[in-house]
Image (tube, helix red, strand yellow):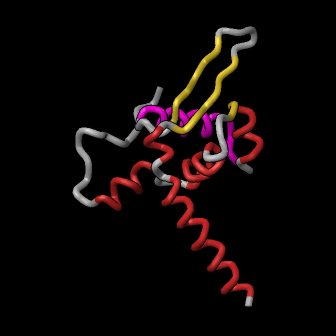
């Protein structure tokens, strides 16, 4: 598995930079968005995030798990069932995503005028 570029032992001094390092791409933000409504299976996430490949989704989920934002639960079934849920830390990003949602709605209204 490829190692994440986020190193919790060497955090940047700037809090905004820390946040950006954790959710620095559109895929992570969209995964967080989808998990805000509850636990999802891999294929549910893949279907709801338009344009993401299986490899990229797998890598992003692994990085988010490594950073403590997402919890991965594997059930011993045949075939195996894997579910993803936001951790308490991941859930604490809700106000950030809510603000991004509000800003995006306002921007859209503004440019559509």
Q: Tell me, yes or no, whether the highlighted magenta stretch contains residue 59.
A: yes
Query: Where is residue 18 shown, x and y percent of the image?
Result: 34, 53
> Residue at the bottom extreme?
113
Of residue 79 and residue 102, the one placed in the foreground of this image is 102
Query: Does residue 46 appear to the left or right of 59 in the view shown?
Result: right
**Residue at horizontal 60 percent and vertical 39 percent from the top:** 56
Q: Tell me, yes or no, whether the highlighted magenta stretch contains residue 22.
A: no
Query: Where is residue 22 shown, x and y percent of the image?
Result: 42, 48
**Residue at horizontal 26 percent and vertical 48 percent from the top:** 11
Quarter residue 54 falls in:
top right
Of residue 17 and residue 70, the one placed in the foreground of this image is 70
**Residue at horizontal 57 percent and vertical 73 percent from the top:** 103
Quarter residue 72 falls in:
top right
Query: Where is residue 77 shown, x and y percent of the image?
Result: 71, 9
**Residue at horizontal 71 percent and vertical 48 percent from the top:** 49
The answer to whether 45 is drawn above or below residue 25 in the figure is above
Q: What is the magenta segment's predominant secondary structure?
A: helix
> Which region is colored magenta?
51-66
The quadrant of the rendering that contains the C terminus is bottom right
């Amino acid at each position: 598995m490829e190692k994440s570029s986020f190193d919790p032992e060497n955090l940047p001094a700037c809090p905004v930079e820390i946040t950006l390092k954790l959710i620095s791409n559109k895929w992570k933000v969209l995964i967080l968005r989808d998990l805000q409504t509850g636990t999802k299976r891999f294929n549910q996430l893949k279907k709801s995030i338009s344009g993401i490949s299986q490899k990229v989704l797998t890598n992003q989920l692994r990085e988010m798990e490594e950073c403590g934002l997402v919890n991965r639960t594997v059930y011993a079934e045949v075939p195996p069932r894997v579910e993803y849920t936001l951790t308490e830390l991941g859930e604490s990003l809700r106000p950030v995503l809510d603000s991004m949602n509000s800003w995006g709605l306002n921007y859209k209204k503004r440019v559509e005028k």
